[in-house]
Image (cartoon, grey):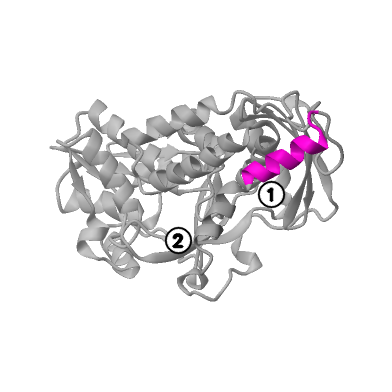
Amino acid sequence: MEKVVVAYSGGLDTSYCVKYLQNELNLEVHSVLVNTGGFSAEELKMVEAKAYEMGVKSHTNCNILETYYQKAIKYMVFGNVLKNNTYPLSVSAERVFQAIEVVEYAKKIDAKYIAHGSTGAGNDQVRFDMIFQTLAPNIEIITPIRDLKLSRQEEIEYLKKHGVDFPWSKAKYSINKGIWGTSVGGVETLTSHQGLPESAYPSQLQKTEPTDIKLHFKKGELVGVNNEIDSSINTILKLEAIASKYAIGRDIHVGDTIVGIKGRVGFEAAAAVVTIKAHHLLEKHVLSKWQQNLKEQLGSWYGMLLHDGQYFEPAMRNIEAFLEDSQKTVTGEVFVTLKPYHFSLNGIESDHDLMKSKFGEYGETNKAWSAEDAKGFIKILGTPNKIFHSVNSEL
């Protein structure tokens, strides 16, 4: 019997895949759940138990938080990546690394097939298939939901027919959770004019009194909160626990999908949004004008390529090298006030703060040039404009 590895989450679509692959294709099914921070230990046990109830030959839970951080989140912070100036790629980025892990496992057990439960209308099918084709061109991809164009009810009826009668309650909202944020989809996000109701967000407002916090950065990486220095992963989780109580980091992203249509998705990403904004403020103080200008462009490109599943594009390694090198002086503390539904950045402290200059204070005094020096500089700076308007006076 040939082996197939299924990217399994315990939900309806991937559960259908398991039964379909067993009964219709007569394959030996091995399920893999790749955790990027969205499952608790208890939830992982529940999914594993469900997988074995479904009849899989083996089930494996893979925790790739450290890999995901080192290969993606770190660079998204370095690049201040917010797609369309809004979305921190909460779910988009993790799909790439989930796909990589599934491929590695398939190779390890010598599987002939890989299967996933994506439909034919979204981004995930592209991300999964591109990674699978790149890393394992000889392993065939099976996508029952996409190929058969199944409705949810058809999947439920098929599972019941084969002895699986879990309470597949049709949740009003589709929730995908990870360490870098949670996406929220519903009937409202299928329109262009409706916002999500308060009840749609998993994290509800719990605190109303403002709280001041201090974030510690070392060479661009978040390494501490309120003088508690820790690993970046643990620090992100701590910040999420603190900031999510204020219902911070909510928004609706509008963007162009990989398959060419526009789409909307809601999200909440308290730690991600606060981290990126605080990091950006620190950079404004410690980087040069041109470093910031180049980083803004390259960070945008990095986010677009990662969103579109192009992680193995060679330019990504080039951009990562630039971003990492740019962080040599991005060390210091950022002071933030958390409030209901929003936050404010109050300032920074850093040994590399370029405002601590002996040359002068903006709008106040200068110590490095005279008034005549300033007049001469301004005269020279304006020369190109004077030439253009002299030659083209009729315009």
Kind of residue indicated by mark 2: Gly
Q: Nearer the viewer, residue 363 or 61?
A: 363
Q: Nearer the viewer, residue 206 or 376?
A: 376
Count of labels in the image = 2
The numbered dot on residue 255 is 2
Extent of the magenta region: 368-381
Between the C-alphas of marks 2 and 1, the distance is 24 Å
Question: Does 3 sit left or right of 195 as displayed?
Answer: left
For label 1, the SS is helix
- What residue is drawn where x is 84% and y is 50%? 210
For label 2, the SS is strand
Whole-percent x, y for residue 326 in the image: 55, 28
Q: Residues within 10 Å of mark 1 (few under 14, many from 20)?
A: many
Question: Does 2 sit left or right of 219 as displayed?
Answer: left
Q: Which residue is mark 1?
A: 244
Whole-percent x, y for residue 303 in the image: 45, 45
Q: Nearer the viewer, residue 65 or 352?
A: 352
- What residue is drawn where x is 77% and y is 57%? 340
The numbered dot on residue 40 is none
Q: Quadrant of the N terminus?
A: top left
Whether residue 238 is visible here, answered yes or no, is: yes
Question: Does 203 sit left or right of 153 as displayed?
Answer: right
Give the mark toward the camera: 2 or 1.
2
Question: Does 81 sit left or right of 95 as displayed?
Answer: right
Q: Residues within 10 Å of mark 2 (few under 14, many from 20)?
A: some
- What residue is drawn where x is 61% and y is 30%? 220
Q: Is residue 185 magenta?
A: no
